Image: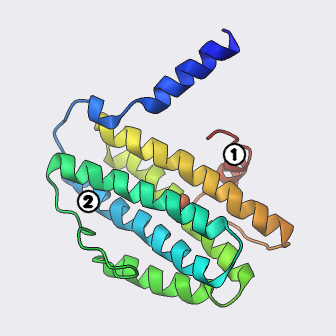
Amino acid sequence: MSGILTFTLAWKMKGQCYKDLPLEELSQAEISSLQWMREEEMLAHDVYARLAEEYTVPVFQNIAKSEMQHTTSIAGLLERYGVEDPAADHVPGKFSSPEIQSLYDQLVKQGTSSWEEAVKVGLQIEDMDIADLDKAIAEQVDNQDILMVYNNLLRGSANHMNAFWRHASRNAIDWEPEHISREKLDGILGYEGK
Ligand SMILES: [Fe+2]
């Protein structure tokens, strides 16, 4: 296949929208997953946006923008299915889920303590995000539109993990994943897609 054709096909696949897929019956597990992921992606955005105020290195500002796209894409699914959006009236740093609120408070405290801890916070968030998306895809979700969005989010998270890992490597920061396996991390760090 020629390079140009490969590029065109890849572009078309990327251009495919979940709205082109049929609306399927939504299970309770899918509702819970969507509401959780909506706030988890918002958590990532808010933590990175807060850390971008502390550190001039552009990684946090850049990834915060991507996280806003992630959470917005889940809001689109909630709207599509007429499910209550837990972040409909979102105020930065405030969450409906007590668990996510507690994570936000702890991650901001950790990340604002030093640059090294901030980089670890980025790695920790992506570790948790990837594990939650993997679990949702494997066990909780079967609607094609949700799977498409979650797989896009996974690709984004793999890129974010690589970005934070580069900073960790440059600064000799030791870190091990808690939620995904070391083998899984190694695979992600070899991932060069977009
Ligand atoms: Fe991310």
Q: Residue furthest top?
A: 1
Q: Where does the image place residue 83, in percent across and percent down from the top left?
A: 16, 56
Question: Of label 2 and label 1, which has the lower sequence position?
Answer: 2
Q: Is residue 126 visible in the rendered structure shown here?
A: no
Which residue is nearer to you in this view: 178 or 59? 59
Q: Where does the image place residue 168, in percent across and percent down from the top left?
A: 77, 68
- The amino acid on which the numbered mark 2 sits, given as a three-letter code, is Ser
Q: Where does the image place residue 65, in percent across and percent down from the top left?
A: 51, 61
Q: Quadrant of residue 35?
A: bottom left
Residue 186 falls left or right of residue 136 = right
Q: Where does the image place residue 97, in percent across and percent down from the top left?
A: 30, 76
Answer with the quadrant where ligand 1 appears in the image. bottom right
Vertical arrangement, residue 19 with respect to residue 86, above or below = above
What residue is rendered at 73% in x and 62% in y? 165
What residue is rendered at 64% in x and 58% in y? 161
Q: Marks 2 and 1, how far apart in space?
A: 29 Å
Mark 2, residues whose alpha carbon is within 10 Å: few (<14), some, or many (≥20)?
some
Mark 1, residues whose alpha carbon is within 10 Å: few (<14), some, or many (≥20)?
few
What residue is rendered at 47% in x and 68% in y? 45
Residue 118 falls left or right of residue 97 = right
Q: Which mark is residue 32?
A: 2
What residue is rendered at 59% in x and 79% in y? 51
Which residue is nearer to you in this view: 135 or 16? 16
- The amino acid on which the numbered mark 1 sits, given as a three-letter code, is Gly
According to the picture, the residue beneath numbered tag 1 turns out to be 187
